[in-house]
Amino acid sequence: MSIDQLDLKGPSSSERSSTKQKNMMSNKGGARIVVDDDDEHVSPTDLSELLADGTKESHDRAENCSFVKDFLRGRIKRELFKRGTAALYFVYTAMEEEMEKNKDHPHVAPIYFPVELHRSEALARDLEYFYGEDWENQISLSAGTKPYVDRIREVGQKDPVLLVAHSYTRYMGDLSGGQILKKVAQRALKLPSTGEGVNFYQFEGIHSHRGFKQLYRSRMNELDLDMETKLRIVEESNRAFGFNMMVFSELEEIGKSIQEEVQEPGLGHSHAEVMQGGDINKCPYYAAKMAAGGNPTYALQLATTLVRYPPCQVLLAAWVALLAGFTAWYIF
């Protein structure tokens, strides 16, 4: 898969302003969502732009989280994946219940897309696959996930406008690079290609991820918010990143006590192996990052490395997905 296919950089502000196409999608109920970019002019004071600038450090920290990097390199322990799925179930159940309660709130209604976005049912199917029919009695809210869930409940009850931050932070990340993450998990854990265990990554109600993200960003920017409230949403988004990293840290600690599982032969390569004698310019991870920054020389280097090292393709695609997943929160 090429870098372009992952929508790494996405359209610039000027490109978004001049786009004349319309993106159409259908949800399960048959309704059509039309995204018209004709009149979209992004301002530095738009919420999406404030989030881009205000959460950059959080994105950078998330990129360097050991648990996430190991996951994307195919070093996934099945038990940790199951526990991570359970953590997400509690988070999304809380968020979607609070969104439902506040669906008529003026700052929640415009970004409320239950058919297209809700993940709790998909996560429930994944948990049933991993734990069996009795899955609800086999999972519990962990200490690392509880503060996240409690905060979502709190803002839902006392300050619903901050649900905008939690919804945006989670859903837009899920829509960015999710298909690659799904493939990494399927291969590393030998999951069925038919989707069992990774329903979370499948948005059946959305036919154009990019088009939907444009719609969502536009709806969010149209919310009637003063600057103080916008900045509070940015702060809450950073807080959400912190909660996610607490979950990752907990899983990382649990992983230290779980016996290492046998990795599928050929699934991963060490960084030392692909460094080719210590030349960082020949490192595919470095080339991928430089190419993502718009450097054509490294884009060519990345393509060459992929050809020369076929077993690295899944890992490199996953690395790009990591960058796409975290940057797309504020690019799209």
Image: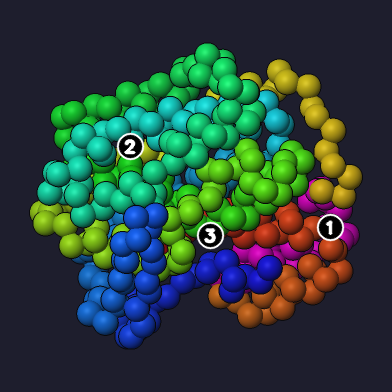
Q: CA distance from mark 1 to mark 3?
A: 21 Å
Q: 229 or 28: nearer the eye? A: 28
What residue would you read off at disc 1? Answer: 311
Work out whether 207 lies above or below 117: below
Disc 2: CA contacts within 10 A as few (<14), some (14-19) or many (>=20): many
**First-in-chain label (2 vs 3):** 2
What residue would you read off at disc 2? Answer: 96
Q: For the view shown, which residue lies furthest in the top direction?
A: 137
Which quadrant of the structure image shows residue 331? bottom left
Which quadrant of the structure image shows residue 152? top left
Q: Is residue 275 magenta?
A: yes
Camera-side mark, 2 or 1: 2
What residue would you read off at disc 3? Answer: 324
Residue at the (30%, 32%) spot, across then down: 97
**First-in-chain label (1 vs 3):** 1
Left or right of residue 213: residue 201: right
Work out whether 143 lies above or below 101: above
Q: Is residue 28 magenta?
A: no
User: Label 2 amino acid?
Assistant: Glu
Left or right of residue 19: residue 303: right
> What element does badge 3 sit on?
helix
Residue range of the region highlighted in magenta in the rendering: 268-293
Left or right of residue 177: residue 109: left
Residue at the (49%, 28%) spot, across then down: 87
> What element does badge 1 sit on?
helix
**Taking the image as drawn, is residue 243 in sight?**
no
